[in-house]
Amino acid sequence: MKAGIVGLPNVGKSTLFNALTRSRKAEAANYPFCTIDPNVGVVTVPDERAYVLQKIAKTQVVIPAAIEFVDIAGLVAGASKGEGLGNQFLANIREVDAIVQVVRCFEDPDVIHTMGSVDPVRDIEIIATELMLADLDSVTKRIEKTQKKAKSGDKDAQAELALLQRLEPHLADGKPANTLELPDDDKARLKQFHLLTAKPILFACNVAESDLAQAEANPFVQKVADYVRTHHDAAYVPISAKIEYELIDLSPEEAREFLQDLGVSDSGVSSLIRASYALLGLQTYFTAGEKEVRAWTIQKGWKAPQAAGVIHTDFEKGFIKAEVVSYEDLTTLGSVAAARDAGKYRLEGKDYVFQDGDVALFRFNR
Ligand code: GDP
């Protein structure tokens, strides 16, 4: 799961990003799959359940789920026309599952606002417009290509063309692709267009340190909340990039005290991660053995073989059965043996839909 961090200059994007990469480097070092790139920060997903399972599995190692945050610098007005770093910027956004836009919700005369004043909704719309224009460009090009195929009688191409011709005026009207009401088959087609405005977007409202405890009362945050209410696939979370940055060099105890003094339980980053999860329709299942307890991220609604596939593609290809127990049953009964005796371990086949918190063991053909 990959989220791209974007934002106008001087909104606190680098502060947040540097804090995420530096403070989390120690945790990130546990990740075998992750080579730390200067513009990628790995943030673990806070989930107490993994530590409860650790006691039951009697293992030393816990590997939490993680989200990669990619710093996507270089947005300038005119990006959609390929100005400045524009093309690279748009290409980077194309590769992420979700967009996190940092918006400035703090006033500070010492920090210049490039647009002259603090106005998060205007800032949101500046980026939205660039994304929309880029999408409009891809849709227009795709229409040209598809027209030929559609004329030759290709049924698929005809359906695609009909969708593209609905999308074009929609985007030209200034509306994101994900606000178009579509039947399921068109939704699947839309995915293949890889449009930027079809991606879910989360607004990280960067508030002043002193405002974080009562962030919902902040008039800038309220404006973003109103905006989100009328937009599909969008959400917002108040954060304080500055607090997150100040936490870097603190021990866990010092960090807790520092946050307590500010009247908050975290800098907003945990909420940011939870909100990303919800927005993307993600959930967690666990594997728990002597070697390690590990959390895995999957989409809601995924069936057993797909869920197995996030561990290894061989698990998906050779899937036979999954042995599954719910987190509640396992932790209530307190041990694997007790859960087995109580008949709480189920043998599930390829049509089983994974549930949040399932603890699983896969059987597969090598
Ligand atoms: P970027 O251009 O969006 O990457 O913004 P930066 O992270 O470089 O931040 C721009 C300036 O704003 C820096 O001087 C930061 O110290 C400052 N800044 C970032 N977040 C906050 C905040 O929450 N409050 C205040 N007062 N300043 C902040």
Image (cartoon, grey):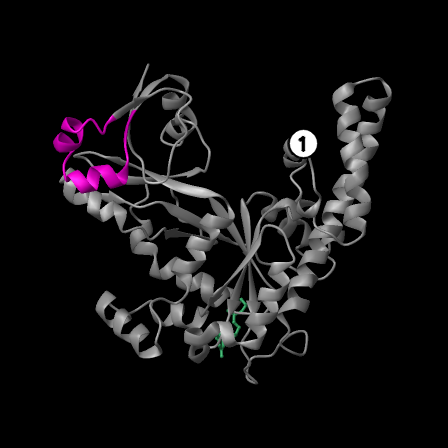
Q: Is residue 196 left or right of residue 299?
A: right
Labels in figure, total: 1
Determine the residue positioned at 29% across, 55% down. Answer: 26
Residue 155: percent from left, percent from top: 77, 19
In the rendered image, is residue 325 in sight?
A: yes
Membership of 325 in magenta stretch: yes
Which residue lies most toward the bottom here? 109
- For this view, does 348 lie left or right of residue 160? left
Label 1 amino acid?
Arg
Report the magenta residues as a range.
Answer: 323-345
Residue 251 in percent (x, y) is at: 24, 67
Residue 226 location, x and y as percent?
A: 62, 65
Check disc 1: other Cα within 10 Å, few if <14, some if 14-19, many if 20+: some
- Whether residue 164 appears in magenta in the rendering, the answer is no
Q: Position of residue 122 (x, y in %)?
A: 68, 68
Q: Which quarter of the picture shows residue 255? A: bottom left
Q: In the displayed orientation, state which residue is furthest to the front.
A: 342
**Residue 157 in the image: above or below residue 103:** above
Name the element at disc 1: helix
Q: Look at mark 1 in the image and give the residue it sits on.
A: 189
Front position in the image: 269 or 249:
269
The residue sitting at 65% across, 49% down in the picture is 90
